[in-house]
Amino acid sequence: MSRLDSFINRMSAQRDMLNHVRDNCALPDGGMIFEIGLGNGRTFSHLRENFPDRRIVAFDRKLASHAAGTPDPQDFVEGEIRETGQAFVGSNAALVHADIGTGYDDKDAMTLTWLPQMVAGMLASGGYAVSGLPLSHPDLEELPRLPTVQEGRYFHYRRR
Ligand SMILES: C[S@@+](CC[C@H](N)C(=O)[O-])C[C@H]1O[C@@H](n2cnc3c(N)ncnc32)[C@H](O)[C@@H]1O
């Protein structure tokens, strides 16, 4: 598959799964949304449009988002998420979206040594995670793949 097709698949899977959560999942009351990997801010912008009543906190090494997809300063956490995210473990988030896969197996394997545990720890019981990398953790129940999403492309979970 070309990298262009792979990129398009990732973007459409991300949008479909976030919309699925919006339409079908009862998020825990009042919980924040965490955007792990702000990047250009396209997904942040989508989250803001589709979950207007939630506080959305975004994480990245550096702020490099488009002006139209940039959080307020108090809702952006700069630095290595492995470290900065620790302060948000136990914060009973309603939804965590993580888009920090690189396409390099060795780098992603390093990320997967800490990301599943961090996401599970950030979520309230009954909260949801949507991720480009698989999050194998006993507290995260994997949900069935959406028909529009290719096998292994994007994953979603409910915190037990
Ligand atoms: C694929 S991009 C996210 C794209 C985003 N969904 C958007 O709408 O533009 C991944 C982002 O995560 C950040 N990132 C990846 N791993 C990180 C880490 N361990 N700590 C901090 N930021 C990280 C990168 O700097 C990059 O901006």
Image (tube, rainbow, N blue to C red):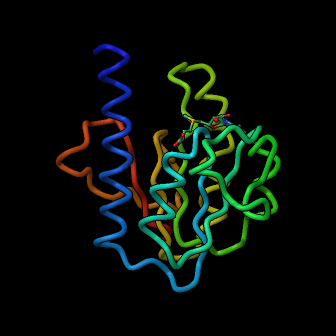
Image quadrant containing the N terminus: top left
The x, y position of residue 98, in whole percent, is: 55, 48
The x, y position of residue 58, in whole percent, is: 66, 55
Q: Nearer the viewer, residue 20 or 121?
A: 20
- Looking at the rendered structure, the number of numbered marks drawn on it comes to 0
* Outermost residue, left side: 147
Dividing the picture into quadrants, the one containing residue 3 is: top left
The x, y position of residue 57, in whole percent, is: 67, 62
What residue appears at the point 45 percent right and 54 percent down from the top-left corner? 130
Task: Determine the quadrant in which ligand 1 lies.
Answer: top right
* Outermost residue, top side: 2
The x, y position of residue 143, in whole percent, is: 33, 58
What residue appears at the point 82 percent right and 47 percent down from the top-left corner? 83
Dividing the picture into quadrants, the one containing residue 17 is: bottom left
Placement of 150 over or under 131, stated as above or below: above
* Outermost residue, front side: 67
Compared across the picture, whether 95 is left or right of 148 comes to right
Q: Nearer the viewer, residue 50 or 86?
A: 50
Placement of 63 over or under 72, stated as above or below: above
Q: Nearer the viewer, residue 1 or 116?
A: 1
Compared across the picture, whether 147 is left or right of 124 comes to left
What residue appears at the point 76 percent right and 38 percent down from the top-left corner? 61
Compared across the picture, whether 67 is left or right of 138 comes to right
